[in-house]
Image (spheres, coloured by chain):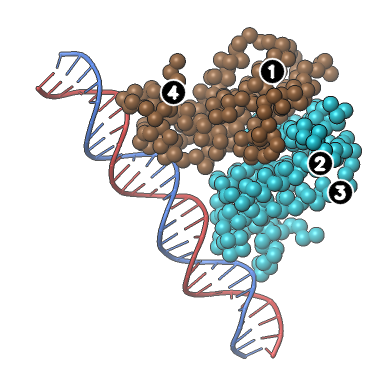
Chain colours: A brown, B cyan, C blue, D red
Amino acid sequence: MTDADDEIVRSGRDAEGTKRALVRAARRRFATEGYRATTVRQIAADVGVNVALINRYFVSKDGLFEACMLRTSDELATRSQARASTPAEVIERLIVHALNAPNGDDPLQLLLLLRSSGDENADRIRRRTLEHFTRKLAGASGWSPDDPATQPVLLKAQLAIATMLGVVMLRTSAAVEPVASATAEELAGPLREALRVLLDDQRS
Amino acid sequence: MTDADDEIVRSGRDAEGTKRALVRAARRRFATEGYRATTVRQIAADVGVNVALINRYFVSKDGLFEACMLRTSDELATRSQARASTPAEVIERLIVHALNAPNGDDPLQLLLLLRSSGDENADRIRRRTLEHFTRKLAGASGWSPDDPATQPVLLKAQLAIATMLGVVMLRTSAAVEPVASATAEELAGPLREALRVLLDDQRS
DNA sequence: TCGTCAAGTCAGCATCCGCTTACATGTCGA
DNA sequence: TCGACATGTAAGCGGATGCTGACTTGACGA
């Protein structure tokens, strides 16, 4: 495990480690404060590294954002690769993912939080990742991607994602009470019910 | 009705009309592109007016954002003042409000509630508006605000709001398919079911 | 007709942001 | 030991952004 990359320790002289640390710090900033509000100087300062390295390693701020999206996309793909399970399990994992990880490191949380960047390429990646995630979610409910009757299920899956997105935003970005300080346990119950309606129905 | 304030017509020499037009244009920008990405020059250009007027009338960009928040807060309060109705009616109104025509201002109002400006005062207004809206929604389901047993209902009402916010976000800001180009009718069905679980239950 | 004042404009300042260029420094093989 | 290269730094440029103060224009009453 190459964790603890963004420690202040940062021994330097380790390009790959520095890149990882930059992506980590950037992801956190982008997720919590948005693309435009995040400055490359902030990110560099978080890692304890000179600003110019961002341009050296990622060409531009857009490039760094894209790297964040790609890494999030990868992690998400890896996790959902874990054998397709029952709808109930999928729902459970979705809830746990979104409600824990208060530091904003969870890829699902990050993906949901990412707002539009203004950069065309990064926005396309974000859209594609979300759509891929939608299909995964619908697929885990036992639908074939080619079945034309799947269309309404895709919509429902996306509504489930939208629900989680809204919850995460209200909790982290807007900090609205009481949902912001509610425990994961308090939220899990109602969320389970709502998501079951959307994901676990009888093919109606 | 003093609509059509942001027409190119803008006869000038009408301070109140200009202020309203600025708030309208600003709200659209803030909601769709976020606070930081929106520039005062853009807003002024949208209205066809000199930038300096923003500072004259609203002191600062923060002040303009706060005016936007206050206006949506007012409009939202006015609408929900319409006699408390049955949960089913409330759900229906919520859905219509959020799914209205994309050029309409209704979804933008909700979207604006998610945007944080960094300004302490404006953010407080946003939080307060959302919390007030939550209580209204819970109240429409027949719960007294003082009953301690209401707490979980507040949470559920907020989850319902979160769902609608997420849907609006995916449709307008992220433009993720298929939800972005789905019709209101296609979405209304599943949304009704999900919201009913959260708002119309049997006090469980 | 003309003075007054609000409504609106103009030009520019200070600051920040993304990015680049030139330079310093640590590491490692010959 | 030392040169070569990769890693990291310092300084600053060009442009955008928020905001300001002095100015112009138009409406209206005496």
* Residue A146 visible in the picture: no
**Residue position marked by numbered label 2 in the rendering:** B146
At a point 81% along the width and 41% down the height, the residue shown is B146
Secondary element under disc 4, as helix, strand or loop, is: loop
The amino acid at mark 1 is Glu
Residue identified by numbered label 1? A92
C-alpha separation, residue under disc 4 versus residue under disc 3: 54 Å
Residue B68's place in the image compared with A138, above or below, is below
Q: Would residue C21 be found to the left or right of residue A155 on screen?
A: left
Task: Assess whether mark 1 and mark 2 are in contact (beta carbons under 8 angstroms).
Answer: no
Q: Nearer the viewer, residue C24 or D13?
A: C24
Q: Residue at x 78, y 50 (%)?
A: B77
Q: Which residue is mark 4?
A: A4
Within 10 angstroms of label 2, few (less than 14), some, or many (20 or more) residues?
few
User: Tag on residue B69?
Assistant: none
Q: Position of residue B35 (x, y in %)?
A: 58, 46
Which of B204 and B50 lies nearest the eye of the viewer? B204
Query: Which chain's residue wears label 2?
Result: B
Q: Quadrant of residue C4?
A: bottom right
* Residue neighbourhood size for the residue with mark 1, other residues' Cα within 10 Å, grouped as few (<14), some (14–19), many (≥20): some
**Given this view, does label 2 or label 3 mark the residue nearer the observer?**
2
**Mark number, residue B82:** 3
